[in-house]
Image (spheres, grey):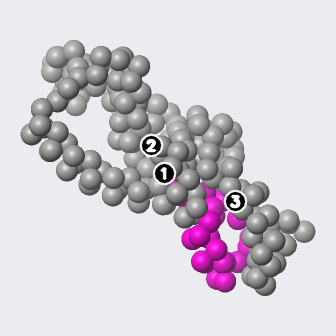
Amino acid sequence: MDSDFLLIRKMKRGENEAFDIFVRKYYGEILSYLGYRCPDRACAEDLTQETFVRFFSHLPKYRHQGKAKHYLYTIAGNLCRDYFKKKREILMDDVKLGEQAGSAECPMDAVSNQLALEWALGELADALREVVTLYYFQDLKLAEIAQLLDISLPLVKYRLRQARQELEQSLREERDDESGRTVSKGGRR
C-alpha cells in the first residue's frame, strides 16, 4: 500500500504526527520548486507554507489516487501564478513612479543579464515557464515532467523547445534594444 495513502488516512483522522511526517516528506521539494520561481527566499517560504495550508484545508474532500505530490505541485504552481499576477500590477505602478523620478543604470553586466533572464522567463506563457522551471531548476527528467503535469511526453518536448526559442528571441530583442537598434516583431529593421 502507498505510504501517502496511509498518511492521508491518518491525517483525516486528525493524527498530528502524520501531518508532520507528510510536511517533512514534501516540504523541501516544494520549497525548492518555488525557490526557482520566486524572487526571494522569503516569498518561496511563504508560498510553500500556503501550499500546505491549502492542501490541508481541502483534505476532507481529497481522494487519494497516488498523486499527493502532484497535487502539491499543482497548488504551488497556482499560488505562484497568482502571486506574480498581483506582483505585475504592483510593478506597473512602480515603473510609472520610476519614470517620474528618473532612472539610474546599473553598471554590472551580471546583474543586468540576470534581470534580463528573469524578465524573459516572466514573459513566457505559464505552461512554457512551468516546463522550463521543472527541467532546468528542478532537474526533473522529461518523462517525470509529463507525469507530473499529466501531459504527453511529446507535448513536454514541444513546450521545452518552444520556451527555448521564445527565451532566445526575447533576450536577443532585449540586447538589440539596449544597443539602440530598432527591432520589429518579425526581426531586425
User: Mark 3 or mark 2, which has the lower sequence index?
Assistant: 2
Please identify, in this view, whether the residue under mark 3 or under mark 2 is nearer the observer.
Answer: 2
Q: The disc labelled 2 sits on which kind of residue?
A: Pro
The residue carrying mark 1 is 43
Callout 3 touching callout 2 (CB < 8 Å)? no
The residue carrying mark 2 is 39
Residue 152 in view, yes or no = no
Residue placed at 36% from the left, 17% from the top? 109
Q: The disc labelled 1 sits on which kind of residue?
A: Cys
Mark 1 Cα within 10 Å, few/some/many (few <14, many 20+)? some
Q: Label 2 vs label 1: CA separation?
A: 7 Å
Q: Is residue 165 magenta?
A: no
Q: Bounds of the magenta span? A: 52-77
Secondary-structure class at tag 2: loop
The residue carrying mark 3 is 69
Residue placed at 28% from the left, 25% from the top? 174
